[in-house]
Image: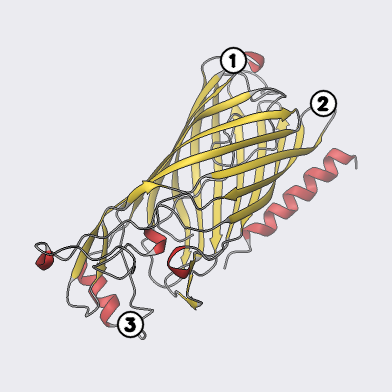
Amino acid sequence: MNISNKLLLLMAAMSVLTVYSAAVSADHGSLGFGIGTASPIITQTGVTLPKNMWASGIITQFINFDSISDSRLLALKNNAKTDADGDVHDVETFLQPSIFAAYGVTDDLTLGLRIPYVLRSGVRSPDEDGGEVLKQGDPSGFGDVSFFGQYRFYHSDDNLNHASLVVGLKAPTGETSIPTNPPAEHHDEEPAEAEEGHHGSGAFEAHHQPGGGAWSPSFGLSFTRAMGQFSFDTSVLYTVSTKGSQATDLGDLFGYNFALSYAFGAPARNNLFSSSNNAPWTAVLELNGEWQDYEKIAGERNPNSGGNTVFISPGIRYSGGNNWNTALSIGAPIVKDTNGYQTDPDYRITYRFVMVF
């Protein structure tokens, strides 16, 4: 067995193991650090930018959730065994547009950053007494900036196999003190200070804020195998969560992804440029999974947090020239194994537009 086949077997075996590591907060979006120049839309590829090449663009993710009624929210609160179990909330939508830029330092090293803006809508939660559901509002603001690097440590002589190490660091640059709507009966009073994170007053809880207020490093691996008109990509990424705003640790994240792409019309030996493969249209089918540990607030575990979610995500990419492409993916959850009560995702839309120069 030659080296490239051994590497392919190793990466595939490791990826299969990650699927069964399942035990995400369900109302959070998830994207790796992929710049999206190659075939997959969410999965990180093993391909790096050529030396001295820049890539920039936008990445937008929208998630619609299966919201529940006020009466069910109150029932969850009032029938909970503990106060922590009864600390439930509901969210309608999540939208995160981001801009990014990346640079090929060498043919094997790419560095970049991403700046997100986070918008949540329809956050609701029972009041402390469990008598009514409060419409807390729509927390929105700039999220945490992510810095990332991708080092390609292996590629075959025929340039069909690529394996990379991926590292990243999320900085506490996002907003962490967005206030909730005051209760209706208190609209004529001064709003509470945005610092407590309690239902109905003060700031939104940490997991609803645009930023986490913590330094969070990430590391992982990505692999690409080109096979004529087909290509296979897989990636894993682990993010270490640290204590941030409101003494909250949002929980470590482990993302795992698989993608199979098909280039219409010609072999896709170079996924960066449509002019080099004569295949402007590429169909993509991905499995995108994420496991998240429990959130901890002042050292106490939040029972309504963490778990495992897997999306099946068909998509399409169009390369309109040798320096830009655009892609759209629509995902549906096929695994929703979350802890306690969390608002489950209904569907997810991911859009990318990328330019290279």
Residue underneath mark 3: 80
* Of the pair 144 and 1, the residue shown nearer to us: 144
Q: Is disc 1 in contact with disc 3, using a CB cutoff of under 8 Å? A: no
Specify the quadrant of the image occupied by residue 304. bottom left
Q: Which mark is residue 28?
A: none
Q: Amino acid at mark 2?
A: Asp
Instruction: Tell me where residue 99 appears, x and y as whole percent.
Output: 47, 34
Tag nearer the camera, 3 or 2: 3
Judging by the rendered image, the residue that carries numbered circle 2 is 158
N-terminal label among 3 and 2: 3
Q: Tell me if label 3 and label 2 are in contact, CB under 8 Å.
A: no
Above or below, 254 against 320 in this view is below
Residue at the image position 33 percent from the left and 82 percent from the top: 80
| Mark toward the start of the polypeptide (1 vs 3) | 3
For label 1, the residue is 322
State the residue at coordinates (41%, 63%).
206
Asked if one can make out residue 172 in the rendered structure from this viewpoint, the answer is yes
Left or right for 237, reference 198: right
Q: Callout 3 environment at 10 Å: few (<14), some (14 to 19), or many (20+)?
A: some
Q: Position of residue 4 (x, y in %)?
A: 84, 38
The N terminus sits in image quarter: top right
Separation (CA) of disc 1 from disc 3: 58 Å
* Dot 2: element: loop
The answer for how far apart the CA atoms under marks 1 and 2 are is 21 Å
Residue in the picture at 54% in, 41% down: 42
Residue 220 falls left or right of residue 87: right
Report x, y in % for residue 59.
Answer: 47, 36
How dense is the environment of label 1, judged by Cα within 10 Å: few (below 14), some, or many (20 and up)? some
Label 2: how many Cα within 10 Å (few below 14, some 14–19, many 20+): few
